[in-house]
């Protein structure tokens, strides 16, 4: 394997891990959704196992991200200077803990509905 292949595999592995964590899922849960054993997901996230095209598509759907992002295209992070993020952070900081929890559950439900209906990515 060339150095470029290795770097690309590491980048994909890191994005898989990041996306899973942001989705709030365990490796075991993801493995079950894919019909794999948990060590397979661990190996993918460590860059020790190749990820098939079909698996990438399924993972993108599960994590609600694009396949292109998982493959390393697009920004690594959201622009912290985006004024919409600053506004959202100010508003979220005003919420009571119970209200914040309800909002997070609502967002998760909306995300699930979008994923189930083949929402755009």
Image: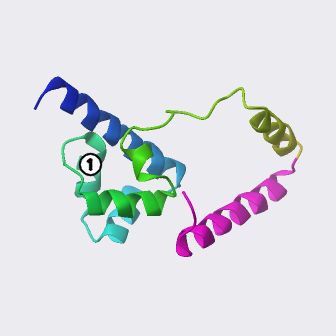
Image: magenta residue range:
95-121
Vertical position of residue 69 compared to residue 79: above or below: below
- Residue 42: x percent and y percent? 28, 50
- Please name the residue shown 19% across and 49% down the image: 50
Q: Residue at x 45, y 43 (%)?
A: 18
Measured as percent of width and height from the top left, residue 93 is found at 84, 40
Q: Nearer the viewer, residue 4 or 33?
A: 4
Q: Quadrant of residue 12?
A: top left
Residue, far left? 1
Residue 108 at x, y = what percent?
A: 64, 63
Depicted 58 relative to depicted 68: above or below: below
Give the residue pinned by disc 1.
Answer: 44
Q: Is residue 78 magenta?
A: no
Please tell me which residue is depicted at 32% across the width and 41% down the height of the picture: 13
Q: Nearer the viewer, residue 121 or 107?
A: 121
Q: What secondary structure predominates along the stretch shown in magenta?
A: helix
Quarter of the N terminus within the rendering = top left
Q: Residues within 10 Å of mark 1 (few under 14, many from 20)?
A: some
Numbered disc total:
1
Q: Position of residue 48 (x, y in %)?
A: 19, 42
Residue 119 inside the magenta-drawn segment: yes
């Amino acid at each position: 394997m060339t150095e470029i292949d290795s770097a690309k595999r590491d980048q994909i592995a890191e994005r898989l891990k990041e996306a899973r964590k942001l989705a709030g899922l365990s490796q075991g849960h993801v493995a079950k959704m894919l019909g794999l054993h948990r060590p397979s997901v661990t190996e993918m996230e460590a860059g020790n196992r190749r990820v098939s095209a079909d698996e990438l598509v399924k993972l993108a759907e599960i994590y609600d991200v694009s396949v292109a992002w998982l493959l390393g295209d697009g920004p690594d992070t959201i622009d912290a200077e985006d004024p919409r993020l600053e506004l959202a952070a100010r508003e979220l900081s005003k919420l009571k803990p119970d209200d914040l929890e309800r909002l997070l559950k609502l967002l998760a439900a909306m995300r699930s509905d979008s994923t189930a209906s083949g929402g755009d990515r």
